[in-house]
Image: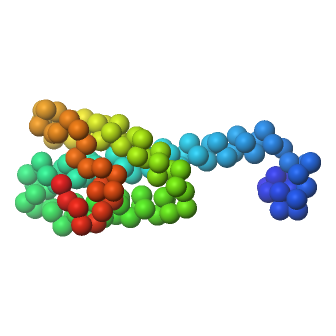
């Protein structure tokens, strides 16, 4: 809090710069991890909606609601940070591959069932009108 006070009062000589740099770096890491998790969950739910029989038959509205929720959360997180959007674009394939493995494991089906390349690019994944 002292650092915030010093910054607001423009007392730059008293700012603990090393601590401030660490805090900002930590925030960035947390934001990135949170967005990766949301993107992984989005891909997981898109895959499950396509490949899990019970999701297709019995719970389609629920799964679509979850997909909408993940898209909304990602968009909310990205609203103020273009650099985070660029970062998510960079890790999209990794998040998709992780999701393939997760769904394969949860559904106990072969990983080869799922497309090897991402089912969506970044804009498609966040498009409410796009469904795999």
The type of colouring in the image is rainbow
Q: Is residue 41 at all visible to an observer of this figure?
A: no
Q: Nearer the viewer, residue 29 or 86?
A: 86
Q: In which quarter of the image is residue 9?
A: bottom right
**Residue 74 spot, x, y in % from top left:** 42, 58
Q: Nearer the viewer, residue 113 or 129?
A: 129
Q: In which quarter of the image is residue 11?
A: bottom right
Taking 42 as reference, is 86 left or right?
A: right
Identified at 16% across, 39% down, the residue is 114
Vertical order, 94 against 68 (above or below): above
Taking 96 as reference, is 104 left or right?
A: left
Q: Is residue 64 at all visible to an observer of this figure?
A: yes
Vertical order, 57 against 47 (above or below): below
Taking 130 as reference, is 20 left or right?
A: right
Identified at 30% across, 41% down, the residue is 96
Identified at 59% across, 46% down, the residue is 28
């Amino acid at each position: 809090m002292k650092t915030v006070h010093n910054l607001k009062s423009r007392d730059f000589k008293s700012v603990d710069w090393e601590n401030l740099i660490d805090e900002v770096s930590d925030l960035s890491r947390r934001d990135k991890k949170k967005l990766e998790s949301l993107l992984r969950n989005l891909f997981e739910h898109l895959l499950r909606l396509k490949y899990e029989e019970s999701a297709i038959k019995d719970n389609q509205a629920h799964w679509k609601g979850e997909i909408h929720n993940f898209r909304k959360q990602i968009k909310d997180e990205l609203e103020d940070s273009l650099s985070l959007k660029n970062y998510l674009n960079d890790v999209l394939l990794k998040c998709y591959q992780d999701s393939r493995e997760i769904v394969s494991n949860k559904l106990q089906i072969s990983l080869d069932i799922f497309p090897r390349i991402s089912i969506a690019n970044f804009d498609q994944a966040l498009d409410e009108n796009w469904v795999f």
